[in-house]
Image: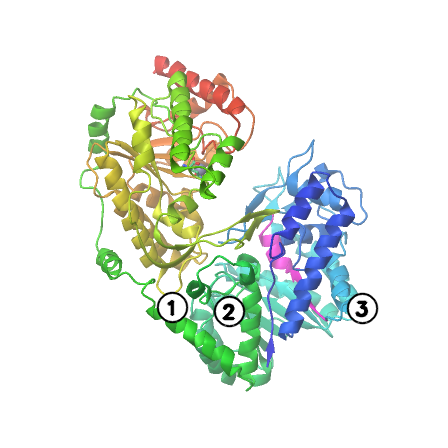
Amino acid sequence: MSSHIVGYPRMGPKRELKFALESFWDKKSSAEDLQKVAADLRASIWKQMFDAGIKYIPSNTFSYYDQVLDATAMLGAVPPRYGWNGGEIGFDVYFSMARGNASVPAMEMTKWFDTNYHFIVPELGPDVKFSYASHKAVTEYKEAKALGVDTIPVLIGPVSYLLLSKPAKGVEKTFSLLSLLDKILPVYKEVISELKAAGASWIQFDEPTAVLDLDSHKLQAFTAAYSELESTLSGLNVLIETYFADIPAEAYKTLTSLKGVTAYGFDLVRGSKTLDLIKADFPKDKYLFAGVVDGRNIWANDLAASLNTLQAIESVVGKDKLVVSTSCSLLHTAVDLVNETKLDKEIKSWLAFAAQKVVEVNALAKALGGQKDEAFFSANAAAQASRKSSPRVTNEAVQKAAAALKGSDHRRATDVSARLDAQQKKLNLPILPTTTIGSFPQTLELRRVRREYKANKISEDDYVKAIKEEISKVVKLQEELDIDVLVHGEPERNDMVEYFGEQLSGFVFTVNGWVQSYGSRCVKPPIIYGDVSRPKPMTVFWSSAAQSMTARPMKGMLTGPVTILNWSFVRNDQPRFETCYQIALAIKDEVEDLEKAGINVIQIDEAALREGLPLRKSEQAFYLEWAVHSFRITNCGVQDATQIHTHMCYSNFNDIIHSIIDMDADVITIENSRSDEKLLSVFREGVKYGAGIGPGVYDIHSPRIPSVEEIADRINKMLAVLEKNILWVNPDCGLKTRKYGEVKPALQNMVAAAKLLRTQL
Ligand code: GLN
Ligand code: ZN
């Protein structure tokens, strides 16, 4: 009985790769230094899997930046603007594509399916000349072999590579990416032949796009691609690996009929329908790589349950053809629990990071082969039992309150236009009111104060004094700028989810639980392990203090339940919506306390609502329903005259616009700066929108200062599609990452533009 790992985190247990990359980029260390750190990481990962007993150990899942960019390099698909002249692609060209250089910006980056990992989007047009330009896959295979580890090299499959690409500038509307299949396959053939020559006996093609709802034309591309590769692949065992969702029945049929393929990897954690497909019909004599250990979460596997699942498919697939695997690459989980020295012992016993998941996979494979490690299994069973029964997980009152929400609707009684009237009586705002999204620049000094307070190096009094001073500065600045609805600037917050997670029960934080987000950037998601409740008010103190400093309305500033959920590791012992409802109830308490404290405008950020959208279309409506419901729960209890804002960090919500309207916020501010047209086209097409709306009038992601004319121009464009009495004027996101030298003139111009237009309306 054998075992396999789809892929492994690259950063290292203490983010060694991050620091090596950043030091290299800052020219503080050499290319050789960086290569040495990378080689050591790869060696230790291979050794770790080898020692654990894993049979199919992946190679080429390491990357200096991103595995899709690696495929772009392999295919020599470098956009001309990076000035590559052929030859093997080195760090220069590679990192220019990833990060830009002095004269050329980086390639576009986008989210990898529904994860928080971002990949570099290949840009392909009819004129790309593909050539074999990075031998990384072969080099890494040989490197592992020299260390005594025979690996299974991993490549992004040709069909997924093309489906994840975008057409180059100028051919956006007309170009079919799949038409390039014939041109990239010759390069794939070269790579495959080289791998064979180097001694590889297996090869893994990651084809995760197969789980999306692809039309038959796209599905045919799999058939075409693998038939074309068949003769080159002969003599190799070929694994097609899919992940992140149940695979649609048609895609299952297409894949399992492919010629020349010997094995299939499926995600058996997300959804249960793939399992039914396998049980109903799995091709004779093929291997099944059964992804039963969750690569997307940090929970210890329920080994007894997984063993049951595996035994149930064993009879269908055959004992010698069943391989135990992870549901997807372990890239999306934290690296090693060993380094969590501060974590509570009991909670720690419930967890498994990548290193622990490798051990679980192997233990399952051995158990299936009749060599069950009884001690390991019973320790696991004990941990599962303790998690089920631990009083720190369950809070009866919260369970009851959340259960009571199901099936019923929660929304404000009065409709939005009447509410806006009631609010206007109280707020008395000018037309085209100006505001910002929440955070103001976070200076080094500010970070130092927070750090020292956390480490008990300064007293609570000193901390409060310092933060109040900062708030007062931000308030004064906004008054000077003549902004209409103020914010306190969020100086007390490190991160918009962590800040709330730290104050809610049911959350725990790790020290080293980092997950790669993009390039060298990592995030450390909180872990939601138990029922969520709010022991005491979280923001009222700061918001009241801020409101007391000004006669203008001060926005209370909260993170919404869906965003808290989507940016955390979520418990897997109850449905996600139940956890979301619990968070919604906690935020509801906070909203109502803010209202009682005299805060008349409350913003509940749902920056990450869209990213939780399931990949499979059949699951999307249900998600949107409970996500939007959760948001409404937070504010269904406030008075008409209390104005509820929300903020979203993306503009491509054309497909979910009706859900966004259904959130029933009074005002929504949205990122828009990079795609006016996309956002406004929704409204041009006649979607009725009666609430307040503030599409960002300038891009805060860039240090560039927009002129008054430019901003006025954009507002005018919006006025052409949206009623003047619902339009707000604001930047497109928080100002946290900018400098005051940029923020002041930009906001000055923004207010000037609003004032200019007011005189013309
Ligand atoms: N209120 C938050 C801020 O301004 C919103 C951040 C976000 O949308 N990502 O920082
Ligand atoms: Zn934002």
- Which of the labelled discs sits on residue 387, or is there none? 1
* Disc 3 element: helix
Q: Earlier in the sequence, mark 3 or mark 2?
A: 3
Quarter of the image with the N terminus in it? bottom right
Picture residue at 31% right of the left edge, 20% below the top: 431
Q: Earlier in the sequence, mark 2 or mark 1?
A: 2
Q: Position of residue 207 (x, y in %)?
A: 59, 61
Q: Nearer the viewer, residue 638 or 551?
A: 551
User: Where on the image, by quarter, is ligand 1?
Assistant: top left
- Which of the labelled discs sits on residue 618, or is there none? none
Q: Is residue 164 magenta?
A: yes
Q: Position of residue 114 (x, y in %)?
A: 48, 54
Residue underneath mark 2 = 293
Q: Which residues are magenta?
A: 150-165
Q: Earlier in the sequence, mark 3 or mark 1?
A: 3
Instruction: Classify residue 35 as left or right of residue 275.
Output: right
Q: Nearer the viewer, residue 144 or 372?
A: 372
**Colour basis:** rainbow
* Disc 1 element: helix
- Which of the labelled discs sits on residue 197, or is there none? 3
Picture residue at 55% right of the left edge, 46% below the top: 110
Which amino acid type is marked by label 3?
Ala
Q: Nearer the viewer, mark 2 or mark 1?
A: 1
Q: Position of residue 637 (x, y in %)?
A: 21, 43
Instruction: Classify residue 121 as left or right of residue 440.
Output: right
Q: Quadrant of residue 302?
A: bottom left
Q: Position of residue 491 (x, y in %)?
A: 43, 33
Picture residue at 20% right of the left edge, 24% below the top: 425
